[in-house]
């Protein structure tokens, strides 16, 4: 038994508004921002639950943020949640993106605009790395699972192996490592 207070359960409206905020503020790395909001601010999910949801979303076809939003929405409000969360998450940014695309079409070759875009890309990469470091610290994966994760990082990040090959190639090792960890508990 833990002393942690019970975690709040969002209403459908709260989930819609929260995913709308995640979508509008999550420039360049929505998964990093979503983890911060859902795990740290709202406490709707634990780090473990978020990692499992995002991991499953990563191996399914389609954008992982969309897959994770559908799973989180379904978890709390069934079909209505599975529709509300991704609609809120992508609706606002879609309108904003259309406006930015028109702006970029008109001013994309201006040096200041190029500098802004390069800065935003660097910030997005930093957010992804920061989130991975935070999740690793909190989850404290056993060495075998950490080794599988590091192999994925090297394969995808350094060797530029396409993601489907990384997932298919490392999945048996990840499953075996997870199985070993569960048996040891």
Image (tube, rainbow, N blue to C red):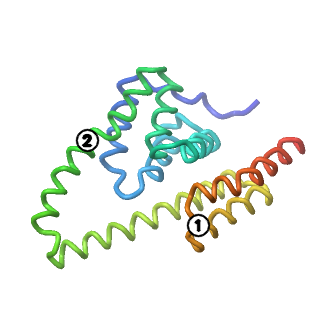
Residue drawn at x 32%, y 41% as measured from the top left: 90
Of residues 8 and 16, which is closer to you in this image? 16
| Outermost residue, right side | 184
Residue drawn at 18 percent across, 57 percent down: 101
> What is the C-alpha distance between the residues marked 1 and 2?
33 Å
Q: Position of residue 148 (x, y in %)?
A: 72, 59
Quadrant the C terminus occupies: top right
Q: Give the residue at x 61% y 31%.
A: 5
Q: Quadrant of residue 48?
A: top right
Crowding around mark 1 (Cα neighbors within 10 Å: few <14, some 14 to 19, many 20+) is some
Q: Position of residue 89 (x, y in %)?
A: 35, 39
Q: Quadrant of the N terminus?
A: top right
Mark 2 = which residue? 92
Name the mark nearer the viewer: 1 or 2: 1
- Crowdedness of circle 2 by 10 Å Cα count: few (<14), some, many (20+)? some
Q: Residue furthest bottom?
A: 111
> SS class of the residue under badge 2?
helix
Residue 10, given in percent of the width and then of the height, sits at 45, 26
Q: Residue 62 or 96: which is nearer the viewer? A: 62
> How far from the left and from the top, in percent, is residue 80?
41, 20
Q: Which residue is mark 1?
A: 161
Q: Is residue 120 left or right of residue 47?
A: left
For residue 44, the mark is none
- When asked about the image quadrant of residue 47, the answer is top right
């Amino acid at each position: 038994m833990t002393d942690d207070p019970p975690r709040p359960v969002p209403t459908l409206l709260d989930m819609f508004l929260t995913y709308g905020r995640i979508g509008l503020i999550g420039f360049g790395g929505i998964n990093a921002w979503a983890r911060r909001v859902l795990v740290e601010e709202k406490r709707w999910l634990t780090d473990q639950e978020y990692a499992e949801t995002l991991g499953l979303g990563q191996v399914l076809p389609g954008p992982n943020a969309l897959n994770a939003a559908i799973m989180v929405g379904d978890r709390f409000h069934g079909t209505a949640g599975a529709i509300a969360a991704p609609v809120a998450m992508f609706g606002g940014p879609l309108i904003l993106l259309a406006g930015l695309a028109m702006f970029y079409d008109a001013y994309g070759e201006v040096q200041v605009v190029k500098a802004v875009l390069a800065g935003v890309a660097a910030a997005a990469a930093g957010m992804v790395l920061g989130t991975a470091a935070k999740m690793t610290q909190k989850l404290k994966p056993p060495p075998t699972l950490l080794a599988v994760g590091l192999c994925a990082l090297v394969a995808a990040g350094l060797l530029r192996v396409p993601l489907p090959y990384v997932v298919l190639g490392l999945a048996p090792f990840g499953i075996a490592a997870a199985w070993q960890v569960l048996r040891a508990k």
